[in-house]
Amino acid sequence: MGYNKELFADVRRQMETRRQTAIETADARRWELYAALPEVEEIDRELSRTGLIIMDEIAKGKEGLTERLENIRLDNLDLQAQREKVMRRAGYPVDYDAPKFACPDCKDTGYVGQKMCGCLKAALSEEGMRRAGLAHLFETQRFDTFVLDYYRQDPRVYRLMQKYWEMCRDFAKRFDGNTRENLLLCGATGLGKTHLSTAIAGEVVQKGYDVLYESAPNLLSAYEAERFGRSLTASVADTSRYLTCDLLIIDDLGAELSNNFTVGVLYNLINTRIVSRKPTIISTNLTSDEIRARYTDRIASRLFGEYTIMRFEGRDIRMQKIGMN
């Protein structure tokens, strides 16, 4: 799977900046060291000539070359030992002027040989979750933290919610560039819709896909700010990503202020992603009848015809947690 190009480029740029900072800091310390300990500078000058000395020995011919190269290696080790001795005597750590890379495995290049380093994978996932708007949510809202025991009061509901948990988990596991399925998570507040959609987002982000997670009010406010030139939120999203991201998750549909403009935007967004075969997940507290009444038949027909419907049931989990339900 290839990572989102913009995300990948930005993370690599951040790593390269970090690497260069480490190298520049090491260079500054080395010049400081030379000023305080001229002996170290002289030793480094001798060490820097190692490559030329090796080339000279190779040019002399193959006879006795192995022994001559071994002598060079031993001389090199002796110089390094002298350097460490001088530094210790002066109270400097032996690695004082060595670059302090955040990742010692790849030295902040992102690769160990031809293989992507784990630090780069982690950075891509972390930045992807931040851009998706779920970095803080994913800390607690994962598949392994979804507690089905809250639905045990009713065996039928328990089986239903277990089925939905498995469907969402399987959606995340099999998600790839060919995924076309859309999900509509319906039901009253506090039944786990946001938890499961967040869990999906977290796993899909970790695969390297571009996921955008946004509440319906913020999403539509961004379009209004773009259309009418006024910001209704603290920051305005790049609305083009709503159409192009690999997976769009719209949380809490129905919580926004609805008008002809927002309904038109919503229709265009849903329809465009269906036509371009880009998967979308929508969660809402609205019933089927409320969706039809609020968003017209054009939107309702696409939601009920092109989305896999999950109707969440049970008792409000938040209220159960505080003993009020």
Image (cartoon, grey):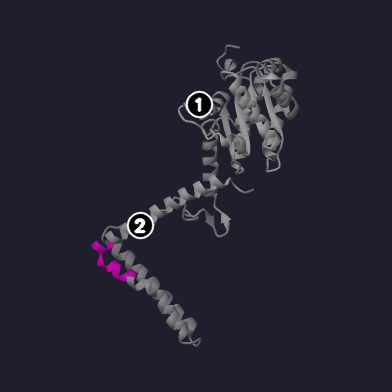
Residue at the location (31% across, 57% down)? 28
Where are the magenta residues, as a range? 33-44
The residue nearer to you, when weighing 167 against 285, is: 285
Quarter location, residue 261: top right
What residue did someone put label 1 on?
A: 228
Residue at the location (51% across, 53% down)? 110
* Depicted 184 relative to depicted 16: above or below: above
Query: With 293 as the anchor, is 117 left or right in this view?
Result: left
* Depicted 158 relative to depicted 118: above or below: above
Image coords of residue 101 (percent x, y): 43, 53
Residue 26: numbered disc: 2
SS for callout 1: helix
Q: Amino acid at mark 1?
A: Phe
* Depicted 188 relative to depicted 129: above or below: above
Image coords of residue 244 (percent x, y): 61, 38
* Depicted 196 relative to depicted 153: above or below: below
Query: With 61 as the anchor, is 312 left or right in this view?
Result: right
